[in-house]
Each structure stands twice: as C-alpha cells, then as structure tokens.
Amino acid sequence: MESEFIAGELRDQMDSFGPVNLRFDGDVAWITIDNPPVNATSTAVRAGLMQAVERAQSARVAVITCAGKTFVAGGDMAEFDRPPEEPHLPDVYQAIEDSETPFVAAMHGNVLGGGFELAMACAWRVALAGTRFGLPEVNVGLIPGAGGSQRLPRLVGFEAAVDIACRGKMIGAADLAALGGLDRVIEGDLAAGVAEFIAALPARPEALSRRKSPEIDTDFVEAARADLERRAKGAQAPLHNLRALQWSALPFAEGQPRERALHLELRQSAESKALRHAFFAERAVARPKAVDGAAPREVSHVAVVGGGLMGAGIAAACLLAGIKVTMLEASEAAAADGRGRVDKILDGALARGKISQATRDGYGAVFTATSDYYATRGCDLAIEAVFEDLEAKRSVFARLAAVLPKDAILATNTSYLDPVRIFEGIATPARCIGLHFFSPAHVMRLLEIVRTPATSAQTLATGFALARRLRKVGVLSGICDGFIGNRMLAAYRRQADFMLADGALPHQVDAAMRAFGMPMGPYELQDLTGLQIAWANRKRQAATRDPAERYVAIADRLCEMERFGQRSGKGWYRYEDGSRKPIRDPEVEAMIIDYSRENGIRRQAFSESEITDRLFAVLVNEGALIVEQGIAENDAAVDMVQIHGYGFPRWRGGPMHHSEQRGWDIIAPAMKSVILQSANTWTLSKRLT
Ligand code: NAI
C-alpha cells in the first residue's frame, strides 16, 4: 500500500508518456524526451510528445529538452522500411506550433533531422554553446518529412538552407544565432539558462509556417543546381532537397504536404535504401564476431617504420588522433625526409583550419623520426610500411621484436604479400596483424584489418579500436592476394584490359564508369596512383600464372614505354604542362590496336552499358567469391571496402547491395559474356550461376 501511495504522489509531479516525461514547475511545463541513445523520434516518442503537448496546455510556457548527451538527433531509421505509424511527425509538430501554450526548444548536443524540425516548430529556440544543427536527410537519400524544408528557409533564408538541406552541412549554435535561427546561446548550465530565458519571455513571435516565404533568386537556384548536380555524381537526393526548398515559396499549407509526399516516396527509393544500408553496414563491420568480448590493448605510442608515402600518412593520421609517434627510417637522412613529409601533411591540416597553431606546435614533443630502433622501445604498436619486399619486411620485424615490449602489437601495411610469411619467426604470432591503409592514409577512411590464423582476438580488437580512434572504417579481412579491396580491383582492371584488347579504348572505359557513378575510371585512376606497384606485382605472379588463363599484356607494354602515370608525365593518357587533365594519346591507342592485331583479335565495339555491365559483373563476382571463401565476413564488409577505399558510389550502397537490389539473375548474363570471351580465366561465384 505504501509503495502505491508513493508512486501516486510521484505521478502527480511527473507524468510519463512512454519515453516522454512531463513535469510541472509552477506555471512551466518541462517536457523531457528520454529515448537513448540519440532520442530519435520513434513512434513511442511521437505518441508521447502528442500527449505531453495536450497535457501542457494549462502552462504559461512549455520547455522541450532531452535526457542524455544530445537533443533529438534524427528519426528512427529502423522504422523507415515500414509504413509510417500514427501519430505522424508533421502532425505532432503542427500541434506544437499551434499550441496555445508557447513552446521553447532547449537544446544540447546534436540537433538533427526531426530534432531540428521539432525546434523549428517551437516558438523559441535556445541552445548550449557548441550545439550543432543539421538536416542530414540528404545523406540517407531523403528530404525532411516534417516541415524542415519549408520552415528552414523561413528561419535562416534560402541560401543558408541550401547548404544545410542540400549539402548536409552542420551549423554551430553561434552561426545559427547569427542567421537569426536561435533566440539565445547559453554558456554553462542549460537548465539555468533556460530558467533565465523563460523568466522574461519576449513577445511570442509569429509561427514559422505563417511567416512570409523567403526571397528566392533564380540565378542562385540555377547555380546551386549545377553545383549540386556536379558533386552528386548521380545521386538524386541533393536535387530533391533543392526542389523541396523551392516549395517554401508557396504557402506552407501547400508546400508542406508536397514535402511529406516526396519524403514518403523517397523512403522507398533504391537510393535511400542503399544509403541506409551503408549507414548500418558501417556500424556493423566495426564489430565483427571475431572480436566479440575481447578488450583492446591500450595504444598511446605507435612506431611507424618507413617514412615514405604510406608511412608519412599513417604517422600523420596517428598524430592527428592524439597518438604519440616514433618514425623509423633506414638512415638519418631518410628520417629527415620522412619527417618533412609528415610536417607537410600537418601544415596542410593547420592551413585548412583542422588543427590550431598550438596543436600543431605540440606535435614537436610527441613526434620523432630516427633510424635508431632503440627509440621504439616503449611503443605499444608498430606499423611497418617499408618497401613491398618480403625480406625487407621480415628483417624489420626481427629487429622490432628485439627492442619492443614482448606484448607490443606488430602490424604490416603490406598490399599483396602474405602476412603469415612476413611474421614467420616471431615468437608470439598472436600479436601480429595486417593493418592495410589506403593512400593518402591520413585521408582515406578504409582500414583493412588482416587476420592471420594466429592473430588473437585482443590483437584484432586493438586494430578495430585504432580504426575508430583514427575515425576510419575498419573491415576485417582474411588472407588472399590483395586482400578484399585490391583483389577486387585486380579483377576489375583485368577485365578492363581484356576489353581494351577486344575493342574498347581507355577513354571509353573511363567515361562508362564515371557515368555509373565512380569518381574516376580505371585508367585515369591508374595514371593518378602510378602503374609501377601493380606492374611489379604482375611480374611477381608471372611464375605461378596458369598458362591456359587469358593474359593481356597491354599494361605491361605501357610500362615498358616508361609511361607510369601522371608522376612520369604520361601513362594511359598524356598530360600537358603539369596539368592533371587526361588527354587521349594516339600513341597509346595505336599500341592497343596493334596489340589486338598481333594477337589475332578482331576488335568489336562495346556500348557504354556493355562496358559497365561487364566491369560491374566482374567486380561483384569477385566480391561474392571473397565472401564465399570466408575472406570477408559478409556482403556488408565488401560494400564498405568498395565505398571507403575505392570511391564506389555510396548512393548505390556498394556492389553487393546493388546486386541484391537489381537481382543476381540480372547481373549473371553479363558475367556469362565475360566468361565466353576469356576462357579458363574466371571462377564463377555460386550466386551468379
Ligand atoms: P615508399 O617507397 O614511398 O616508402 C617506403 C619507405 O620505407 C622509404 O621511405 C624507405 O626509405 C623506407 N624503408 C625501406 N627500408 C626500410 C627499413 N629497413 N627501415 C626503415 N625504413 C625503410 O612506399 P609506400 O608507397 O609508402 O609503400 C610502403 C608499403 O605500403 C608497401 O608495403 C606498400 O605495398 C604498402 N602500401 C602502399 C600503398 C600505396 O598506395 N602506395 C597503399 C597501401 C599499402
């Protein structure tokens, strides 16, 4: 009885409507959304808010806040695959805007999507300094669905709204206040700041939906459209957002239903499904089964061996993430060069405003470059990035093992060599791992985390923790030639070369893959990254290559002509006076045509779709084999490698997701044509049979 009485008393003070609580303090209704982790606007939150709004009608003012570390940071994406359930978000927000009792949104953390829309339905908006705002729907192929595209231009003007809704830019509290989007920025304690604000409320402003439409300059819209189209590389959502913002020129009662209808339609679109898949896959690959329950080792001091292109990028990435770095080079002179490369990257970060001068200066104390192995003695982790040579790498690890603590983790950044062979002779192979970065290592988000049969769960967990700390997407890979990404790339390039021999030219292949949504075609990309490493790899494989397999030596001939790509001034294309713009080169095209003739190949014309269908089929066939062979844990891992390491269009969700959506039976015929044209060469995945 007693406990019921107490519960009853508490109920008088606080009403709970699912994850939404309402508490009266004098004439103020405090509404708190408590839906961890990010207070997403799930069905329960919407229903709770609706009830709380009704109950708050006796108050002078109602304040909406959130429990935990952030205000509402979006919708519940898990609900997007189902038909929307009542109450609908626009109705809840309309009730807030139309309420007799005016509402204050009191915000902290991230105010995103439905959270920002909620804030815009309130009469006033106040936020802690440092709060960040955005409408990231565009990143998942959507437009706002609860008035965001209609209220935002009325709040901050059309131009700022384009940056936020179409480009997905986040805006800080101070900048939002400067645009007139916040009524107060609170320093220190949010509750105290809100109490002060509501003690002397200004006159209630006109609701955003009733304010006059923003000025929309047609020249600005056209320029924005051209820019969005160019950057989107085939994605449609940025343009849909622009269209929705333009509807804010209409009365709200006309614009808002259009926004809602398009939002619901886009939830079903292939683009949004692909982008949502990528969003969830990123989170899923970070926790592979192999690390379940394993605690990572603390990493505070990393040794990077080799200060070349990769070593410098890796060292900079670690420093920028607050990790102490000792770089080892072959000589003091090479160490000085390595330091110079790292300094250049750090200076670039300073120039772009990514770090402060004080942070830049601070690296002097935590970064050393030397040729003295003894300097690495306190390191928790060593990442080797010396020449791609088995003996060179083995001798590095033998020397490291002699000076490092016995449990320090030993990692190799090899692209193609077998880590098991690299680590042969190391006494405790459980601490050995591959950490395969992508160039430039301080920029590219992919990190392949390569496991040998001996690698322990703790070592793997440390690799994944490092990826998170470096803000990278770690993907677990088993061992095969090229691991996940470069193996797929090799298959893709191989088929592209087959098509050159059979009748295509480099610019046609590049144009077709750009049209598909790749940032670059395979030949422009090779010119950019250089052709030598792959050439060396092909020479290495020559001894074991099955003579019955098809081998096209066009790329080898190009290398023999000393055309190694942009750095040597020419490659598949020619380049004028240091420009990066590829120009077709008759010399290369003649060489390709000669090659076909010499090999008795009758050149055929390939249409753009034949090129993309075949290249895509080969890519996805290799991805499927990689999953079948257990090199990748699942399709999502392959998709993440392609999106974060190779520029595969995110809006297509990665090759595996894209195939799943299109249907494997639609892709299979293209793979069959590939196989017909190059006998004894391809292994067919079960999924394409
Ligand atoms: P790089 O030639 O730019 O740098 C190699 C550096 O290692 C040179 O500065 C050299 O002085 C140093 N070095 C050689 N022997 C050494 C030793 N015994 N002790 C200390 N330092 C030594 O080569 P890059 O491109 O940085 O490649 C390094 C490794 O990373 C290779 O295994 C490569 O396959 C791999 N990798 C390369 C990628 C790329 O895009 N270039 C991408 C991912 C991995």
Image: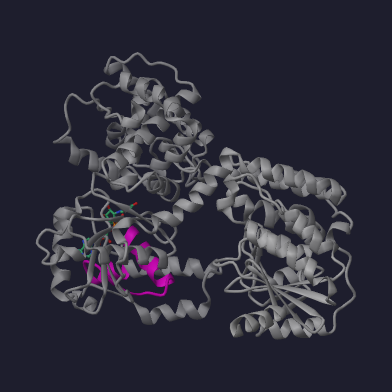
- Which image quarter: residue 367? bottom left
Q: Is residue 183 above or below residue 490?
A: below
295 relative to 186 in the view: left or right: left
Between 227 and 585, the residue placed more toward the observer is 227
Whole-percent x, y for residue 565 in the image: 38, 42
Q: Is residue 498 above or below residue 265?
A: above
Q: Which residue is drawn at 46% across and 40% down?
A: 657
For ligand 1, the image quadrant comes to bottom left
Q: Main secondary structure of the magenta part?
A: helix
276 relative to 143 in the view: left or right: left
Quarter containing the C terminus: top left
107 relative to 640 in the view: left or right: right
Q: Which residue is drawn at 85% across and 80% down?
A: 201
Q: Residue at x 28, y 57 (%)?
A: 413
Q: How many marks?
A: 0
- Which image quarter: residue 675? top left
Q: Is residue 325 covered in magenta?
A: yes
Whole-percent x, y for residue 371 in the image: 22, 72
- Which image quarter: residue 403? bottom left
